[in-house]
């Protein structure tokens, strides 16, 4: 596995590195997954978003964004991870993810590091140590009235429990919808999602083992 030269803090408008991260952001994510530039820049400037760039020989090959929001929350959200297309398959995504986990653990003020992931990404995060919450989860589209199915996964600073109370998860998901995606409290997508959370949520190893697999 090729090693990154360094992983550095960055602002979206922070010179060449920031500009390279923003170009990669636009290349890697479709419009419905991208926040408004002003929102991304404001949250990063205020310290809510911890953006880090992975460099190889001084060039940006990937970045991530960790959303730590304000004090008092029980979770952080691993919002974005991207690696330049020509640099994929060399372990940079895993290196950046493990760096984000380290930053999350270093803070020491949250129990859960959450991530929303499509099928392929969910298998990747599962191999690194994230577990899937056992209920259907939908991600709102920015600027639209729809939502798409994804996996909600979590990494616990206290070690993965077998189950977690639904009432403990609901405030976190409500906060993600309202503060992260800027939905209104009466948005039907929020009510639908909260109704899908059972009283006791199983934590699932991911990807699941296939029949006969050891």
Image (tube, rainbow, N blue to C red):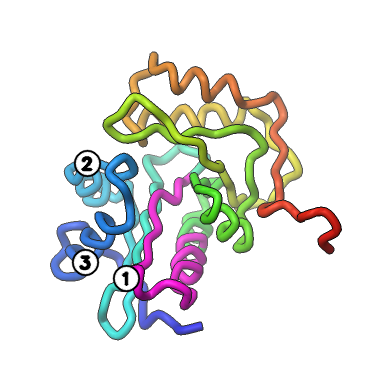
Q: Is residue 176 above or below residue 52?
A: above
Q: Is residue 148 above or below residue 211?
A: above
31 on left or right of 210: left
Q: Dot 2: what SS? A: loop
Picture residue at 40% right of the left edge, 58% below the top: 81
Q: Dot 1: what SS? A: strand
**Relative to the observer, which residue lies in front, 176 or 213?**
213
Please tell me which of labels 3 and 1 falls first in the chain: 1
96 on left or right of 198: left
Taking the magenta stretch, the answer to whether it contains residue 95 is: yes
Picture residue at 30% right of the left edge, 29% below the top: 144
The nearer-to-camera label among 3 and 1 is 3
Query: Label 1 belongs to which residue?
Result: 8
Please tell me which of labels 2 and 3 falls first in the chain: 3
* Mark 3–mark 1 CB contact (< 8 Å): no
Label 3 crowd (10 A; few <14 / some 14-19 / many >=20)? some
Label 2 crowd (10 A; few <14 / some 14-19 / many >=20)? few
Pinpoint residue 92: horizontal percent, then vertical percent. 44, 73
**Relative to the observer, which residue lies in front, 10 or 142?**
142
Res. 176 visible in picture: no
Query: Label 3 belongs to which residue?
Result: 20
7 on left or right of 3: left
> Which disc is residue 36 wearing?
2
Residue 43 falls in which quadrant of the image? top left
Q: Most extreme residue toward the top, as rendered? A: 186
Q: Is residue 57 above or below residue 169?
A: below
> Which disc is residue 173 wearing?
none
- Residue range highlighted in magenta: 76-101
């Amino acid at each position: 596995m090729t090693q990154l030269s360094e992983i550095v803090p960055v602002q979206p408008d922070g010179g060449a590195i920031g500009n390279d991260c923003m170009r990669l952001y636009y290349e890697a994510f479709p419009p419905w997954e991208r926040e408004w530039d002003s929102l991304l820049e404001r949250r990063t400037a205020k310290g809510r978003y911890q953006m880090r760039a992975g460099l190889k020989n001084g060039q940006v090959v990937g970045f991530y964004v960790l959303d730590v929001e304000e004090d008092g929350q029980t979770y952080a959200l691993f919002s974005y991870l991207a690696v330049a297309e020509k640099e994929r398959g060399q372990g940079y995504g895993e290196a950046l993810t493990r760096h984000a986990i380290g930053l999350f653990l270093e803070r020491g003020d949250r129990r859960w590091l959450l991530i929303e992931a499509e099928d392929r990404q969910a298998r990747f995060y599962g191999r690194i140590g994230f577990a899937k919450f056992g209920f259907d989860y939908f991600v709102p589209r920015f600027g639209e009235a729809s939502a798409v199915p994804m996996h909600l996964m979590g990494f616990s600073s206290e070690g993965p429990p077998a189950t977690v109370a639904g009432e403990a998860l609901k405030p976190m998901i409500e906060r993600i919808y309202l503060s992260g995606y800027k939905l209104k409290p009466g948005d039907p997508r929020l009510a639908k999602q909260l109704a899908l959370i059972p009283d006791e949520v199983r934590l699932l190893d991911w990807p699941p083992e296939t029949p006969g697999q050891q």
